Image: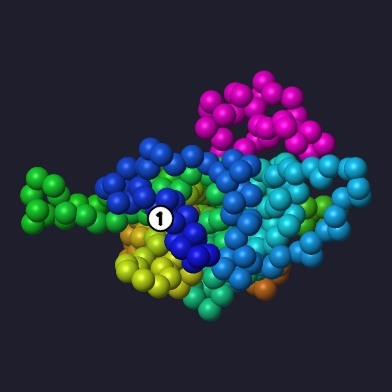
Amino acid sequence: MEAAVIQGFHDRIRAGAARGGKPNPGFRPLGFRGLLAVLALPSLVLGVEELPTPPPAPAGVQAQSSPVAAVEKLRFPGIAIHLEERCVDVEASVCLRRGLLELVACTQGTKEHESIVVVRAKPMHLHAALLLLGARPGSPARRQQDGAQGDRWIDVPPHGGPVDVFLVLKGEDGKSVEHPISEFILRSRQRSDTSASADPVPKLPSHTFLFAGSVVQGDGPGPRRYLSDNSGNVISLSTFGDEVLCLPSIHTQDNDALPWQVNPALLPEVGSNVLLRLRPQRPPAAKAAADRTPPYSPSNPIQTDPRK
């Protein structure tokens, strides 16, 4: 029963891929009820660590529910979800300070030789955490047959909701400082780029990536696979077709043409623990509504959290 529920959950998330890359018009970001539905699944199915159940409320006191309280009922290993700050923090460590890049982040034992950080979380759990913040999944880049000419294949660029990516490091005063990931990525010196530029080695122009959402694969009975869990491609600069987050267009994997390299200026030594912070951007309409709404208060369970 639980496997069927999780299967349907992923079918709904990935339905856009079956429509030729167009977003599922029936999909909406998870609200409070959707969040509770996800949390109601057994921890064995989701692979999460559930916190001990709190004691029941005293007689005559009505228990209150809120998104914050619901999220506090569980922990995705290596992930912290901050509803009030509307971001996801992922435990990571620096794995590269010199060399060409294909990824910003990968999982352990996969592509540490071409990624800035390695994360300790499962990509599927990261996907779920972004959903809980209302991020909209899309689809990685892929190839498909041209409808008009069935013998021709065309490249379809990725799409998905925008997510800002940061590294959180300790400053000289010991306080945590949030840095856009673009500060750690430079244009590769190996490229024969003769375009005029005031900066001889420009940085990655943006720290905003797309929530492509990897790919759920498998037909018939039995569990499906979340491909990023196998490949380790969490946040990509090159195009792999199974990453969780990616750049807005298609980029080469050819080592002779990789456009980006590590900028070690602010980066700690290899092995240093850092936080990878992901913050989904609000759609303009939702942001305007949040600006007009009083701050959310967990003490009022009837009130809707405008940050969702």
For label 1, count other residues whose C-alpha is less than 10 Å away and answer few (under 14), some (14-19) or many (20+): some
Which image quarter: residue 117?
bottom right
Magenta portion: prevailing SS class:
loop
174 or 298, which is in the foreground? 298
In this rendering, the count of numbered labels is: 1
Residue at (82, 36) in percent of width and height? 299
Quadrant of the rendering where the C terminus is positioned: top right
Magenta-drawn stretch contains 284? yes
Give the residue furthest to the front.
Answer: 59
- Vertical arrangement, residue 154 with respect to residue 25, above or below: below
Which image quarter: residue 305?
top right
Residue at (53, 26) in percent of width and height? 285
Q: Is residue 19 left or right of residue 78?
A: left
Coloring basis for residues: rainbow
**Label 1 SS:** helix
Magenta-drawn stretch contains 217? no
Which image quarter: residue 191?
bottom left
Residue 200, horizontal then vertical, whole percent: 48, 49
Mark 1 belongs to which amino acid? Answer: Asp
Residue 166, horizontal then vertical, whole percent: 62, 51
- Residue 243 visible, this angle: no
Q: Is residue 46 left or right of residue 5?
A: right
- Residue 141 visible, this angle: yes
Residue at (36, 50) in percent of width and height? 15
Give the residue furthest to the bottom.
Answer: 109
Residue bounds of the magenta highlight: 281-308
Residue for badge 1 = 11
Residue at (81, 45) in percent of width and height? 63
Residue 304, horizontal then vertical, whole percent: 68, 32
- Vertical arrangement, residue 267 with respect to residue 289, above or below: below
Residue 184, horizontal then vertical, whole percent: 58, 56
Q: Is residue 150 left or right of residue 48?
A: left
